[in-house]
Amino acid sequence: MIARPVDTKTKILDAAEKLFGQNGFDATSLRDITAEADVNLAAVNYHFQTKDSLIDAVIARRVEPVNRKRLEMLELAGPNPQVEQILIAFLSPIMHADFSAVFPLMARILASPDVFVVRLFKRHLTVIVERFTDALSQALPGLSRPEIAWRLHFTAGAMSHVLARALSMPELMPPSSAGFDTETALAQLVTFAAAGFRAPEGI
Amino acid sequence: MIARPVDTKTKILDAAEKLFGQNGFDATSLRDITAEADVNLAAVNYHFQTKDSLIDAVIARRVEPVNRKRLEMLELAGPNPQVEQILIAFLSPIMHADFSAVFPLMARILASPDVFVVRLFKRHLTVIVERFTDALSQALPGLSRPEIAWRLHFTAGAMSHVLARALSMPELMPPSSAGFDTETALAQLVTFAAAGFRAPEGI
DNA sequence: GTCTATAGGTTGATAGAC
DNA sequence: GTCTATCAACCTATAGAC
């Protein structure tokens, strides 16, 4: 590992990501961020104008590569992917996002009822939800699209809960595993969700 | 419906619950709350001393009856309940909590990585998790306890995501259903989670 | 691009009259 | 128990020197 020089803008994004994840958007002041990043207070306004557009930038920086990777993995699974392959394409990119600061941040975005965050959520996720619903429809011809939408919803919720609690509540995580084990979590979640998706449709 | 006089303390709790759910704990000021409740600013300090202990009171007021009801329904399911019965006992009390303000509030509690909230979460939920893990262990003798802990975790996540998005994103909810239909959501979730729990344990 | 200084507003909490 | 008035601390954002 060679220590690279990091520019001010990146230092601010890194610090903001960490603190937003830890304490939330509102509880984190620009002063907290510039102190953590070891830059001047005015730099954040110079580079991002307002706090809201900083939040936007922090989220977009992480969400977009994850979504690109999701679509890429879905492509790679071929024209007729199995349920498990589709779920892995959906879950793996976010669960492997290797900055641990990303986990609580993502969980906050996913769970927040804030209109501001919901808008962001929609902007980034609508196309993903559509593409994956299509793929799952094809793999599970017995299910109606609304039913698939529900179940994809449940899967995203299970995932976001794991991300939210992975770091803050290791003791709620499976024992034995010292700390959080991404591979195990992913495998367990895929098993659970795939079985859920294959359940026959109710009345 | 007869309009009852409501005391100041209850008015504060009601307003705080609504605003905390809508905007979060940090983004909601005591002034917002007293304006919504139509009481004086000083009243909140008189009745609750600090903002933190107000948050505590708001959460406890809703979580405790839900948890009581969960244990009660589990008792009523008899000595050898089926997976579906156990899941309904776990999910139904919270999904039927009829104040719509409770939904986003619960979702916030469930998803928040804040240490303050995690502490509350543990205090109220540890006994529930243990009791339900026992019941599920008995109903699914093929699964190890860690595996059951994971799957209960996933189920809680799916539930919290539904609560979080039920009101803010009705268009992500199954189409046709105008608004949010608790019974449908509960039935779909129980079907999904029961199938997930019955999946054979991985390697 | 980076800094200091500060304007202008909000916050949680309290003192003290009624 | 309820009010007004106020404090001290904090906030975002900007102006202007370097």
Image (tube, coloured by chain):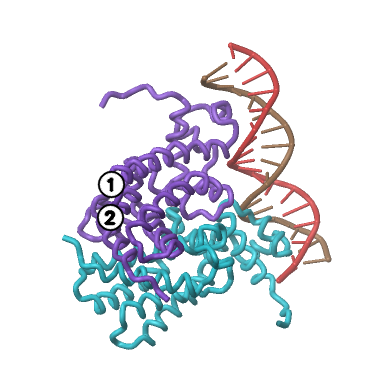
Chain colours: A cyan, B purple, C red, D brown
| Residue topped by disc 2 | B82
Q: Amino acid at mark 1?
A: Ala
Give whichever of B191, A52 is nearer the camera.
B191
**A4 relative position to B178: left or right:** right
Q: Amino acid at mark 2?
A: Gln
The label shown at residue A185 is none
In the picture, the quarter occupied by the C terminus of chain B is bottom left
Work out whether residue A120 can be spotted.
no
Q: Give the residue displayed 37% in from the left and 82% down from the top.
A: A74
**Is residue A135 depicted above or below C5 in this figure?**
below
**A115 relative position to B41: left or right:** left
Q: Secondary structure at mark 1?
A: loop
| Residue topped by disc 1 | B77
Please report, as a chain letter, where disc 2 is located: B
Q: CA distance from mark 1 to mark 2?
A: 8 Å
**B182 relative position to B163: left or right:** left
Q: Give the residue displayed 41% in from the left and 67% down from the top.
A: A123
Q: Secondary structure at mark 2?
A: loop
**Is residue B44 depicted above or below A87 in this figure?**
above
In the picture, the quarter occupied by the N terminus of chain B is top left
Say whether mark 2 and mark 1 are on the same chain. yes
The mark tally for this picture is 2
Q: Give the residue displayed 42% in from the left and 53% down from the top.
A: A113
Please report, as a chain letter, where disc 1 is located: B
